Amino acid sequence: MSTKPVISIIAPVYNEEPVIDELYRRLSEVMDQIGEPWELIMVNDGSFDGSAEKMRDIVARDERVRTINFARNFGHQNAVTAGMDYARGDVVVIIDADLQDPPEVIADLLKKWREGYHVVYAVRSERKGESVFKRLTAKLFYRLIYRITDVDIPLDTGDFRLMDRQVIDAINTMREHNRFIRGMTSWVGFRQTGVYYVRQERFAGETKYPLKKMIRFALDAITGFSYFPLQVAIYASLVLGLIAVLAVPVVAFLRLATGELVFEGQATTLIVVLLMSSFQFFFFFVMGQYIARIYDEVRRRPLYIVSEVWETASLAGNNADQNR
């Protein structure tokens, strides 16, 4: 590319064949109206439909578009990370390929950047086309994260955001494996503000975040930015210990007053044992989540493996198998 891009747009792609042409059309229309040099980095996260062919055709037509092809599916957050690694712009915008986040909002994000903000996150004022369950669980998730994490993560924000080059360079030094980009963005600091928008219905295809992935994503967010789950064990043990201490004089008083044993019988004992065991296994699970993440880090495996990079200058691809 002859002109260094001012704006880099990152769009992770996983089986989005019906959306890609419309994504490119709307993004290019918006960016051409803005009038700054730009590039679009589409990260093919192991798609097995016709997404790769669609992206290759776009790269052949427009030198401002590049495609980073993963060797397999490494996940949405790692795809975003790859985009940030390869981005060359002074400012980077992350947007999902499904067009639920309207490209037209990019102009509003850039306006705030020009006012001197380093991070401009898009805040969802309304979520169209989503089930009541999805909206409710998302609302609970954002509020839970806000309450228990050690950083101030804005409510109702996703990965749709703009980041200055200073912020991108700072985040690129953070190579942790269980990634939560929006938490990492808040952790690095700098001047941040939000822009409200209405999240649209998915243009086509199906969601790539079913309940199982949402739960795993929530675990990554909580364990990556909070020790609260581990601290809960301390609080629970204190409460149970206090109950046990208070129960001694109560049981003694009832025994003396009535002359009968209180809470006698195997059923009561079994219930208490089961209750205590459930607490123990729950906290073993919590500890296991943290230990598993430590194991991920000490193995020092790359976050992703690139099989090819497609750009107009060389559609034959860069087969260097770059590991990051």
Image: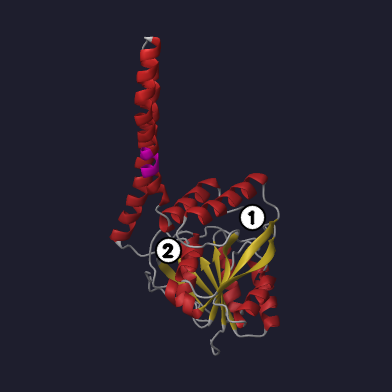
Q: Which residue does the numbered mark 2 point to in the structure image?
A: 71
Residue 213 counted in the magenta span: no
- Residue 152 visible somewhere in the drawing: yes
Q: Give the foreground label among 1 and 2.
A: 1
Point out residue 71 in the picture as x, y percentages from the top left corner. 42, 63
Spot the residue most to the left: 298
- Looking at the image, residue 106 lies above or below residue 229: below
Q: Is residue 302 left or right of residue 210?
A: left
Residue sitting at x 52%, y 58%:
48
Which amino acid does the dot numbered 1 rest on?
Answer: Gly
Residue 235 counted in the magenta span: yes
Point out residue 11 in the picture as x, y percentages from the top left corner. 56, 68
- Looking at the image, residue 262 lies above or below residue 224: above
Q: Which residue does the numbered mark 1 point to in the structure image?
A: 205
User: Closest to the observer: 50 or 223?
Assistant: 223
Secondary structure mostly seen in the magenta stretch: helix
- Looking at the image, residue 262 lies above or below residue 10: above
Residue sitting at x 34%, y 25%:
248
Residue sitting at x 38%, y 74%:
320
Point out residue 137 in the picture as x, y percentages from the top left corner. 59, 47
Point out residue 37 in the picture as x, y percentages from the top left corner. 60, 85
Q: Earlier in the sequence, mark 1 or mark 2?
A: 2
- Residue 262 visible somewhere in the drawing: no
Residues at circles 1 and 2 in contact by the CB criterion of under 8 Å: no
Label 1, label 2: how many angstroms apart (C-alpha)? 23 Å
Q: Quadrant of residue 57?
A: bottom right
Which amino acid does the dot numbered 2 rest on?
Answer: Ala
Extent of the magenta region? 233-238
Q: Which of the colour schemes (rainbow, by chain, secondary structure, one colour) is used?
A: secondary structure
Where disc 2 sits, the SS reads: loop
